[in-house]
Amino acid sequence: MNERVAISKSPEAKKRFWTRKRRAEAAGWLFIAPEVIGMILVSLFPLGFSLVLSFTEWNLVGGLSAIKWIGLDNFFSLFEDNKFLMALENNIWFTIGTVPATLVISIALSAVIQKKLYAKSYFKVAFFIPYICSTIATAAVWSALYHPSKGPINQALLQLGIDNPPNWLVDTSFSLVAIMIIYVWQLLGYQMIIFLAGMTNIPDELYEAATIDGANGMQQFRRITLPLLGPTTFFLTITSIISSFKVFDIIKFLTNGGPNYSSTVIVYQIYEEGFQRFKMGYASAMSWVLFLMIVLVTSITWISQNRKVHY
Amino acid sequence: MRKIQLGNWLLTAAFAVISLFFLLPLFWMLSAASKTEKDVWTFPIQWIPEKWNLIENFKEVWMGDVSFTLFYGNSLKISILTTLATLLISAMAGYALSKLKFKGSALVFSLMLAFMMIPEQATLVPRYIMIKELGLYDTHLSLILLSMFSSYFTFLLRQFMAGIHNDMLEAAELDGAGYFRIFWSVMLPLSRPILATVGIIKFIWTWNDYQGPLIFLYSTDLYTIPLGMQFFKEEFGTRISVMMMAAVSADIPLLALFLALQKQVINGIAIGGVKG
């Protein structure tokens, strides 16, 4: 023991630059470097860059010299732009229509599967398969199912005695709903898997104790399952609100935001203004509105969880 | 006791019916892909085709002038390379964040969590400009470079690696292993379950990515499967049987991967959700 102390205090040891501590430090930075550099280059820098661009008017075709500083004009124009306002409104309806529905249905499905069903693994797989499938392939299938006159959905509705079934994707009042249905169909299994995992973590003793106290299934669900799933529900609420803001693939493939902009959303507008009209400044302003909305939602949910979530 | 069991059987039966709603669109896709165009729309639906046209549809999708064979190759290349790169970069970062002590690691970790909030869509315009300026527009490299960094997967790997006992690492260190050696020969093998999970999920996401290729690719030769689907929609828009064959083709590798590795996929999704 004494020898060691002596060695570490010897002048040679002091001169060595690569001390153990320094080596660990350098290794740490070396291992983290690719990720950090990458995140700065593909996330942080572009985020700042798009903020700067949002204060400019710039058509990419004109080259760098065509950049014009216009201050907040883009943001003012956004709120006079009917297409953007419609996109914003559609995004809000999309969130209201899909988020609570998927949360409630998937929690109910998983509670029943967890407690009551035989062949649990079959159900996990069956409900989860839509999430695994290629979104674009799924969109292609549904576009056929939704065919106004020949599609199986409307054929079935006619059989059921509904004489004027909706024209789904080509109907201005149904296009967004049609897309919401596909979206929910795809996402339910994913949320169910996460809820099931959360339920597995709840100790059986709690249910046993409740059973002894005479609590029925519904009471157990309300008093034990739901509160203890708080963190899971919180996580899924945030992530599903955020992903509902980012919906794009299905819309681009199926409707191009139409008919008559009835199914357009913010990301679709970013795509149209930025990559089809090359209005980079304007598209960047929209990007920032989207980003701020996401930050806002995350913060609100974050703050409110402090009171509601039981750990 | 008996009564409860009967109830469970009834519920199971009810759920079996509900589960059909999740599977029917896929059965419909399969059945339409094996029919002649004329039979696709018959109602009530012929689930099993009267006249098989599977091989013809297959030929049309896979052996045409611009065929799925090409799109497949592109998708495989991009998905495999992106997945490998993500695994390496995120595992390195996960190791640093969980096992190495360095100044600023706490800050880096919290930044990493904050990065998860930045939506890809908010940075598309600058990314596009950067890729153009670098001369990488219309290359597969652009897609790989843009999607190989992931704070989400880094976070998952970090959480897993933090649970690996330090004894293991100390033993290796006593045997004279350096940091790279410890990472490669101790951390990576011990993290195999989470690496498998992250790898599969990243592969599936990359395979399904539509927005990236849509914006960063121009030449049909470079198209991936989702863009290929769009191509088929434009070329064969009214020929649903051919479209459905394309859709089946896009789904098969994913379904095969999923059915073979169900546990990893489902666990992976669950880990992300529960610990996130």
Image: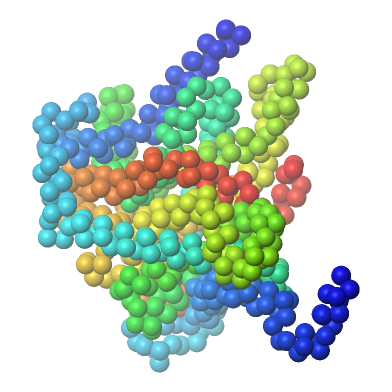
Q: Residue at image x 70%, y 32%?
A: A203
Residue B1 in percent (x, y) is at 61, 9
Q: Residue at image x 12%, y 60%?
A: B65
Residue A269 in percent (x, y) is at 41, 64
Residue at the extreme right = A2
Q: Is residue A138 above or below residue B38?
A: below
A13 with respect to A293 (left or right): right
Residue at the extreme bottom = A65
Note whether residue A139 is visible. Answer: no
Q: How is the image coloured?
A: rainbow
Note whether residue B267 is visible. Answer: yes
Q: Quadrant of the N terminus of chain A?
A: bottom right
* Front position in the image: A78 or A202: A202
Q: Residue at image x 76%, y 17%?
A: A212
A89 with respect to A272 (left or right): right
Q: Quadrant of the C terminus of chain A?
A: top right
A287 with respect to B44 (left or right): right
